[in-house]
Image: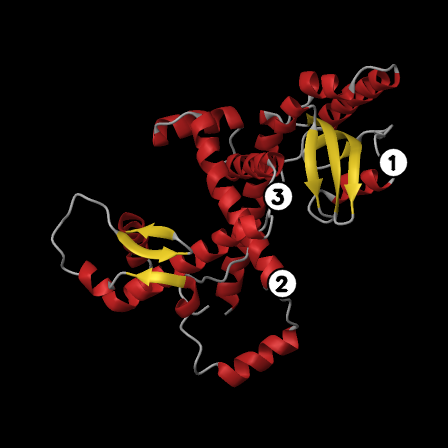
Amino acid sequence: MKRSWIVLACVALASLAGAAPVLMDGVAAVVDGKPIMRSEFMNNLYQFQETPEGAAMSEAQQKDYVLERLIEEKVLLSRIDRDSIVISNSEVDQRVTAHLSQLAASQNIDLATLEKAVRAQLGMSMAQYRDQLSKQIRSHMEITRVRQMHVGSISPTKKEVEAFYKAYKDSLPRQYNCVLLSHIQIPIVPDSMIVDSVRNVAEALIDSLNLGISFELLAKNHSQDTSAAKGGDLGYFKRGLLDPAFERALDQLKNGQYAVTPVKTNQGWHIARVLGRKEDGVRSAQILLRTIPTAKDSADVIARADSIKKVVKTKEKSMWKSA
């Protein structure tokens, strides 16, 4: 992306080097009438200098790289209003909730413990942390949508990648922060008794729906999802962005209908409902009842992981001896 048509005015980067400290913030560049502040530029520069990729560059190269990256981001963000790109609050909430759930699962803790850790380590409440995450995720989603609209999704074949590498390998930059990994992942699955009991609750709620009780009211009172406050409304999603089982249930429903049997996903049991459809997506609602593993379920998986670890170590030792 050329600076000649995306930058209306640039500040000479050379003036940043060795300059005396100033209290007043300055402008590093102006993109589409919106400034990139010097403080924003310097913060990104300091972070980049700490990476192996940044450490391998000269200071001038570091500044050029960081400014180019900030300019590209601002240009993409400036297209959001023009391209009528709208990210619903429910989409952002869903991503934030998924991120927090994954973070808790990776540390083998529950959300309550995660909240305590956030307060202790970051000095903020979970609500403040969610708000901070929401802003970051919304910005990332907006930039991704703009890229998809103007660039599209590029999916080269393996042969095309190999041909490209063969032709240009000598001119490709060195890759940093790369590591080849392998792992054995064992999901923590709740006991079947928990799964069955939660399904029974979901079926009881469907019975209530059949008796004429409002879906929105039941969602607000029972759904264990951020969409509960909106009566379960998830907003519009393009096909392929929701859980496949949930989407299959939506495919069987007409506008306004709810599923007469609960849908099972990794999150728990869902009561799905279609609120409306457009050419590129469906607006749905849900009542989510989570199936949360117990401490015993977690302990069982840890014991299994330890057992597998011992087997792997034993095999490694025997391989070394035979070698």
Is residue 129 placed above or below 76 in the rendered structure?
Answer: above
Q: Circle 1 sits in a helix, a strand or a loop, which is it? A: loop
Residue at image location 71% in from the left, 24% down from the top: 194
Residue named by callout 2: 152
Q: Position of residue 190 (x, y in %)?
A: 67, 30
Front position among marks 3 and 2: 2
- In this image, 140 relative to 214: left or right? left
Q: CA distance from mark 3 to mark 2?
A: 35 Å
Q: Which numbered disc, 2 or 1, marks the residue that appears first in the sequence?
A: 2
Q: Which numbered disc, 3 or 1, marks the residue that appears first in the sequence?
A: 3
Instruction: Sort mark 2 into few (<14), some (14-19) or many (20+) by Cα contacts within 10 Å.
Output: few
Residue at image location 61% in from the left, 33% down from the top: 300
Q: CA distance from mark 2 to mark 1?
A: 31 Å
Between residues 196 and 146, which one lies in front from this camera angle? 146
Q: Which numbered disc, 3 or 2, marks the residue that appears first in the sequence?
A: 2
Is residue 214 placed above or below 277 in the rendered structure?
Answer: above
- In this image, 6 relative to 319: left or right? left
Residue named by callout 1: 254
Between residues 321 and 274, which one lies in front from this camera angle? 274
